[in-house]
Amino acid sequence: MSATTHAAAPEPVAERVQREIERALQRNVKGLEYVASPAPTVGTTPKDVLYKRGTLNLYHYLPIVDEIYRVPILIVMATSNRGYILDLAPGQSFVEFLLRSGYDVYLVDWSPPSPDEKRLRFEDYTLDFIPECVKRVRKDSGVKDLTILGYCMGGVLSLLYTALHPKAQPKNLVCFTTPVNFASMELFAKWSDRRYFDVDRLVDTLGNVPAELIFTGFEMLRPASRIAGQLQLWENLGNEDQVKSYRMFEKWSTDTLPIAGEYFRQTVKELIWENSLYKGELTIGGRSANLRNVTAPVFHVVAEHDHIVPYAAAHPLIEQVGSTEREEVMLKGGHISLVAGANAQKRLWPRLDAWLGPRSV
């Protein structure tokens, strides 16, 4: 009578995790100290609060070199994300790099909108918040010229502000991974299909759109990425730098902000359903937001492996602006690694400095 061979049952996840912890402890892996320690401290570059109103925060970073470019930089973040992705830690901070390179840096960052701010619209951001920040940067710096730099949807707001103020253009406009053709953001377009997605009911019921919904939407673009990242973390527990880096990016990616309800409604209806920015048909506060109104020098950086803003969604920006001086650069990396992390330090940061430096005197 022959013996029957049975495949070994897979090891339960909990037991595997416990076994890996015990092995790591036996090896006295320093990485475990960082996993078990409090959340990493981020955004430590010294700064002053120049202006604050509701969800809006305007910061001015303190200079760290003696010689500073004449033209300051005003960075505009997306309303759904914290600005400290650009200031993770000393030596890993885009803001710190700009300061050490001699730029005068200001940042438009956002707090969660209050229930009373659920009515905030494109008009509030592009005809009130950003113009007020521009005015205060000019007054604080004593210089009329300034560079506006927008990241992702912060780039969209920067584009809209510039298009809506054709006679008051910034000296330079820089955009990172900024979508224009929202029909090419295919997964977002499918999830918000007007046949199935009742955005009016969502906003009318909830007011501000919860951070959990926004975070889950981004997570669904690559459902396995978080699991893959956690497995990679376990494999590199002995690498102190990688563990610290993982924890900083993990903190930022889960620190998503709610979105003002009316702003979300407009984004879905105007940008995604109607694709009116791409078609040149978007109006805000009775003004045309046609990208042909943008005449400032434009520098647009896109990521080769961007799963959030694909190239087809971002590329039309450089084609549609009315600027005679415009440049698009594609760099290796993803939506986040393009601007933060080791590869950003080697690729994006020096490339931007080479373009912006001569235009900041």
Image (cartoon, rainbow, N blue to C red):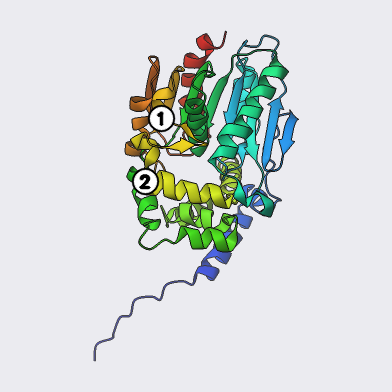
Q: Residue drawn 52% across and 29% down?
A: 161
Q: Vertical placement of 344 versus 56: above or below?
A: above
Between 355 and 267, the residue placed more toward the observer is: 267
Relative to 310, say whether 204 is above or below: below
Which residue is disc 2 drawn over?
Answer: 274
Q: Does residue 216 appear left or right of residue 104 in this picture?
A: left
Residue at the extreme bottom of the image, as rendered:
1
Residue 312 figure quarter: top left
Give the left or right position of residue 137, taking residue 6 as reference. right
Quadrant, the N terminus = bottom left
User: x and y percent of residue 361 in the render?
Assistant: 57, 7
Q: Is residue 157 above or below residue 294?
A: below
Q: Which residue is mark 1?
A: 290
In this view, the residue in front, 13 or 121, is 121
Residue 89 bears which disc, if any? none
Residue at the location (64% across, 37% down)?
A: 109
Q: Residue at x 38, y 75 (%)?
A: 8
Q: How many numbered discs, if any?
A: 2
- Around disc 2, counting alpha carbons within 10 Å, would you say few (fewer than 14), some (14 to 19), or many (20 or more)? some
What residue type is disc 2 on? Answer: Glu
Callout 1 secondary element: loop
Q: Is residue 185 left or right of residue 81?
A: left
Whole-angstrom CA distance, mark 2 to mark 1, is 14 Å
Q: Is residue 87 visible?
A: no
